[in-house]
Amino acid sequence: MRCPYCGLGDSKVLETRLADDGYSIRRRRECMDCQSRFTTYEKYDDLPLLVVKKDGRREAFNQHKILDGLIRACEKRPVALEQLEHVAAEIERELKSESLKREVTTADIGEMVMKSLKELDEVAYVRFASVYREFKDISTFMNEIEKLLRKG
């Protein structure tokens, strides 16, 4: 592993631990030349998962897009970033492990995000749903809130 500071290709591992609920390995390293410390992660290399967009385009799955949407929905809400990172990682893990197909639709992903948000924070759920389901007017918005109230 090359040092990101001086470029030397020799480093020693100081610490190794499991990360991402055991799906990757985190290693703390120290450069043998400049003694700078840095972190590396090891993950298994798998086939890419493609996302089919509403207009039919396909693009590589990107967990960061899910995390960005979760962060926007939870803005100014009492939800820790670690919880959102865990949700995004769980969605990716579920999509990759439970599906034999290599493609997933944005609708499938959106439903998974909404299900997770509903359990995590109802206000964030309604925010996300209003954008995802493209609420056209206040009555559609109110119908979604009434569904939440009936189930709660």
Image (cartoon, grey):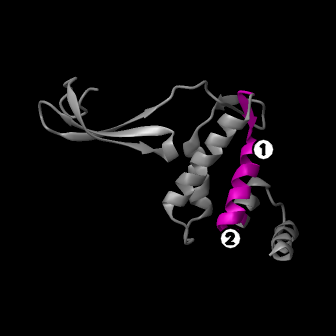
Residue occupying image coordinates x 50% and y 29%: 44
> In the image, is 52 to the left or to the right of 39?
right
Please report the bounds of the magenta region as a residue range: 101-125
State which quadrant residue 50 falls in: top right
Residue 141 rendering spot, x and y as whole percentages = 82, 68
* Quarter of the picture holding the N terminus: top left
Return the x and y of residue 29 as percentages of the image width and height: 25, 37
Quick check: 51 above or below 82?
Answer: above
The first of marks 1 and 2 along the sequence is 1
Near mark 2 (Cα within 10 A), the count class, few <14, some 14-19 or many ≥20, is: some
Of 125 and 32, the residue lying toward us: 32
**Residue 108 drawn in magenta:** yes
Q: Splitting the image into 4 quarters, where does residue 76 fall?
A: bottom right
Does residue 21 appear in the picture of this structure?
yes
The vertical placement of 50 against 21, above or below, is above
Residue of label 2: 123
Label for residue 5?
A: none
Quadrant of the image containing the C terminus: bottom right
Query: From the viewer's perspective, is 58 left or right of 139?
Result: left
- Quadrant of the rendered structure where residue 84 is? bottom right
Q: Amino acid at mark 2?
A: Val
**Residue 59 place in picture, x, y as percent:** 65, 30
Disc number at residue 107? 1
